[in-house]
Amino acid sequence: MKSPACFITIVSLIASAMSVQAVTHAVLPGASIQAKIDIAVDGDIVAIFGGTYNQDITINKAIRLVEVSGQQVTLAGNVTFSGVSDCPPFEGFTVGSSGRGITVTNTTGLVIRNLDARAGLGVSSNGTTAFKITDSQISNLTSSGASAEVAKTSFTGGINHTAGTLNAATVTVAGNFDTQSAALKTVAFRTIVSGDCNWRSKKNWFGYSEARTFIFTDQNQAKVVVVGNKIDRQGGEANGIYCNVANCSFLIANNRIVRVGINGGGDGKNGIDLRGGGNKAVIANNYCQLQYYGWDAGVRGDGIYVRDFNQATIINNVIVGAKHGISAPFGVLAQNNLYWASPWNLREANGVVAEGTLYTNPLFVENEAPTLQPTSPLINAGTTDPRYNNRDGTRNTIGPSGGAWFDPDGWTTENPVVISFDLSVDMVLEGVDTEVILSEGQAVSAP
């Protein structure tokens, strides 16, 4: 027979186990959601019946809000997550109204999923917040927390990344995608931006994406990688990729920059424009197409422009319809670039000495430039430096389909894509944090 002390201990353990079981708190239409949140404890569930709730609510504990099965719930007030560690997911609701939205402060682990937050201010984060948004429709995102991930989500407005890190993948943005100089790292992969990218982060990677323009300003000693994108200036607006900073490192490779020009008069603008001073850049395997929509074709800009006091390697680019192929100071390396379809006798400007320039017809597939026909003279015609070989080890192919940095499956593959914040051709990053080494143009896992 067990002693009374042993019996009391067993009863206490059973009671303790029962006390930590999750409790479900039901919210009927018209009732207070906050009242149920206030009496809940970590691990509890607040189940909300269908209807529209014009209430501001604050979640400050690890509880989960859910819709009652089969019910449609609209949370029209402000929704605030504050000071929650290992926060349960927030999903399935329609959230926000004019002037109201979701704020996440000093909260970790939160996943926002299958949410419709188009009606209000969208989502904003601050403090030590680390969270993820996926499979949702949001009006705007302001990311000022420690870190944020966004995947498979559309924004009817824009994104503003002001601090911490932000990783965006398979995202569509109807407005602009902006970052600020206090942001530590911004990565955008397969991101479609209808507006402009105005970036200022300390580390920047924009790849296999689309935008109206990519502008980088107001930063010092940053690293910027722009690879595999389509930049479409649409109505002939100025400058495709424009950078005006100091002492930064750039890799601008394998981009398709089209319909650059000036509509309505003024100075000509450029496909790729690097200003400021003290910058180092590799500009390789891009396609820059310039055109003019006004009365004077003479104001058409340059394919690639590099201002004095910058160092650059400009290789294996295709430049179509420009006034000058390359405008850059003496000492800039310019090799194996192709100039084509210009009303001028294309040449360089501002002192740069080019080597191995081609003027031949690139033989693009009809209506699919810069896709090359199998007999194109650009295939394996780039620089002979083996560091710039194609990924299959062959000599560099001039244009955006060639070189070591370009992943031909970057728009479609489910495998990791090479992401680099280093100008060195001998080392890149796979995914975001995994180091790999380039061996004969191939990205292979590091030992």
Image (cartoon, rainbow, N blue to C red):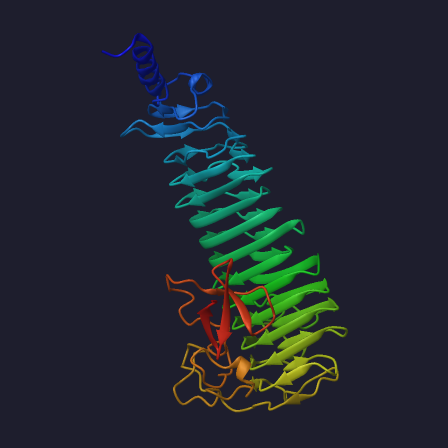
Where's residue 312, x and y in %?
A: 67, 76
Figure check: 258 above or below 55: below
Q: Nearer the viewer, residue 428 or 221?
A: 428
Q: Is residue 228 left or right of residue 44?
A: right
Where's residue 55, x and y in %?
A: 47, 22
Figure check: 200 above or below 83: below
Where's residue 19, x and y in %?
A: 36, 18
Q: Name the quadrant containing residue 241.
A: bottom right
The residue under the point 33% across, 30% down is: 72
Q: Is residue 204 left or right of residue 190?
A: right
The residue under the point 48% across, 26% down is: 61
Q: How many marks?
A: 0
Figure check: 133 above or below 176: above
The residue under the point 52% across, 73% down is: 254
Where's residue 358, x and y in %?
A: 56, 90
Q: As drawn, which residue projects farthest toward the top?
A: 4
Figure check: 369 above or below 218: below
